[in-house]
Image (cartoon, rainbow, N blue to C red):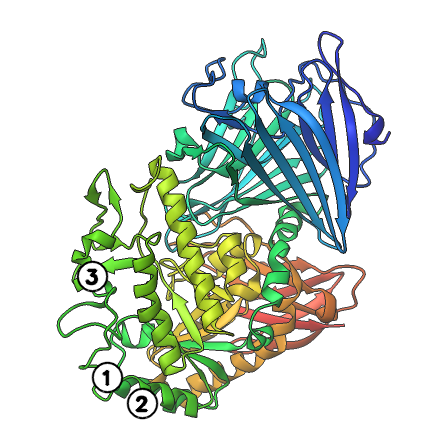
Amino acid sequence: MPFGLYLFVKEDGKMKQVYSEIRLGDMKAVYVQDEETCSMELVLLPEDACYEPVYKEKPYPDSMVQVKLGGDAYQGAYAGGRTLRESASVEALIFDRQQVEKQGEKTEVCTVFRDERGYVYRHVLTWQDKNQSLFSHTVFENHSTQEAELELLSSFSLGGISPFVSSEEWGQIRVHRIRGVWSMEGRPESQLLEELQLEPSWGGHAVRSERFGQVGSMPVNGYFPYAVIEDTKSDIFWGAQLMHNASWQMELYRRGDDLNISGGLADYDFGHWKKNVAPGGQFTTPTAILSVCRGGGIDKISQRLTAAIEAAVDAGPASEQELPIIFNEYCTTWGCPSHENICAIVDKIREKGFSYFVIDCGWYKQEGVPWDVAMGDYRISQELFPEGLQKTVDYIKESGMKPGIWFEIDNVGAKADSYNDTDHLLKREGTVLTTSMRRFWDMRQEQVQEDLAKKVIGTLNTYGFEYMKMDYNDSIGVGCDGAESLGEGLRQNMEASLSFIRRIKREVPGIILENCASGGHKLEPLMMSECSMASFSDAHECEEIPIIAANLHRVILPRQSQIWAVIRKTDSLKRIAYSIANTFLGRMCLSGDVTELSDAQWQLIDRGIAFYRKAAPVIKHGYSMRFGPEVVSYRHPTGWQCLLRLGTGEAEHLALAVFHTFNGDHAQPMETPLPADRHLQIADIYSDAEAEVTIADGQLICNIPEDMRAVAVLLEE
């Protein structure tokens, strides 16, 4: 039975009825209105969803716009301190109208609400032709004569999850999240609603809420702004990501039989965010990415979400489209680059296939001062570059590589002169905001923007740098002074930081930007859409690199995930192949003892570079699936994994399988299923020695009877 004919029956006999049903590619947005309250709920479904009606005993209405205004009553039912959803501000919403506009390849659904005080809410859902995801945001307009105080305003709110599960069924809905901590980014987490205590109460009274997110200027310092809800009974997945570079939250909410999920800026309770909107003013939330699909597990729904920024990445620098290889000298010089050691490295790697050479941190440090407390002034070190920086840059260019340079734009080190420039640094409650080694520029100040333009943009243009690594090695935390709340101060500051990045792109046309924050603390879609690639992690020489790299396929595009292979002169060939194979899970970047390697070590690296070049099309355009047992300890990994990436589009004839064994028993070969509709054959294999790889009965079979070894297999139709 099509969803458009379905009526949700309430306990008292009243109805929730479909107002409109709008097809958006292989999805449909269903707007459901409660007969009694006129509240409007947004339900996303796969376009082909047909099913028998499921009885709902207590389907409480849930608004597609979640808002809390200062002075309005909070929800009761023990919600205080746990949620700001479904407040009196929501109860005051009156549905006004809905408009559907198609402009070229874009369809926009604008649903408008108002209340009697003169506040207007515009919920905008946007779909681009052929995309498998939607963009969602909310605009608040103050048409009253009084200032409005926002304490919560959602970017999205989805309800009716799941229409396929009845009141009597339990253990059917699973929540998938992804955690992120330094050097162990991307750990998946999966729990049933019941495990999260999101079962409705016997009387339907007390609310159930799981509010999670991140507070501070590192948006992936705890959780990724990502959630997937799975109806295991019907094999349907709902997914959401948030595009925001500061504090954010998502919230799983349940009072009746249906689950609801909303997200956006961290609210006043969670992230101390409060926004005053003057009469005649407006405020727009960050954008959320939404999708829904049937089947394919969390790999499929995740890649529908990450593909949302594909067009932005395609529009990036021309050199990026071939996924060129990077050399970064950090794990060679350890924060002490000089003209002498850079030239020695360049001499060794020229004509090896590297396109970018990045001068990392330390080029500015003064004698006796470590790099990590010296940033902010950015005066070229006379000790390290006695003849200036231009001679070094020219040497890199003459070798055929594009030169890159490191900046930590927003932050100031404790030993820099700028550390004492307190008029231009962020404050909290009147005191300069200070961590153990850093302070932070107030990016909202015009003077700060202009000074940074001279230091950063001036350096890029003066020396002809074509690549910039943007690091960010501490978090502001809950927020800063200068706005109506600490959280709003943080939001404004990070908005100004993003504006400066966009200015760099305007004033240094074609610049290649690397998004870094102690490795992976800024791997969210907004920053990823502005940059060519990101540092996937700081786990540069760790055994857990392939685990992290494979996990990140669910939250960023592999073509943007810069993975380091740090090669040491003491490395065995097995260890070198393990490190090189890691880079096939994203973008190849090398560092380490490259001036001291043997011919045999270089021959193995050269083979890896050649293999990467052949695999680049499927890294760029593909669909990823991870196979193997769960790895419990990343620091002490056991078992094995295979990341299978099937080519799409122009790479549809290719597939890439990257096998890694960890510690433990490897008596049984590793088996990975291949799609039945593709006739794939082994085209190339990369490892340190002969590898036993076969295809039989629709399985790719790899036998590696030893610990900590990697085998990569390129397949072709």
Say if mark 2 contacts mark 3, CB within 8 Å: no
707 sits left or right of 624 in the view: left
Inspect the image, locate mark 2, and give the three-letter code of the amino acid beneath it. Lys
Callout 1 touching callout 3 (CB < 8 Å): no
Q: Of the residues under marks 2 and 3, which one precedes in the sequence?
A: 2
**Which quarter of the rendered picture does the N terminus lie within?**
top right
- Dot 1 amino acid type: Phe
> Is residue 171 something one can see in this rendering?
no
Q: Amino acid at mark 3?
A: Ser
Q: Position of residue 298 (x, y in %)?
A: 62, 46
Residue 199 falls in image quadrant: top right
* Residue located at (47% from left, 62% from top): 502
User: What residue did someone put label 3 on?
Assistant: 418
Query: Image height check: is 18 above or below 587?
Result: above
Element marked by disc 1: loop
Residue drawn at the location 21% of the way across and 48% of the way down? 434
Label 2 Cα neighbours within 10 Å, binned few <14 / some 14-19 / many ≥20? some
Q: On the rendered structure, is 407 left or right of 136?
A: left
Residue contact between numbered discs 1 and 2, judged by CB atoms under 8 Å: yes
- Residue 391, numbered label: 2
Dot in front, 2 or 3? 3
Say which residue appears at 56% left-offset and 28% top-offset: 66
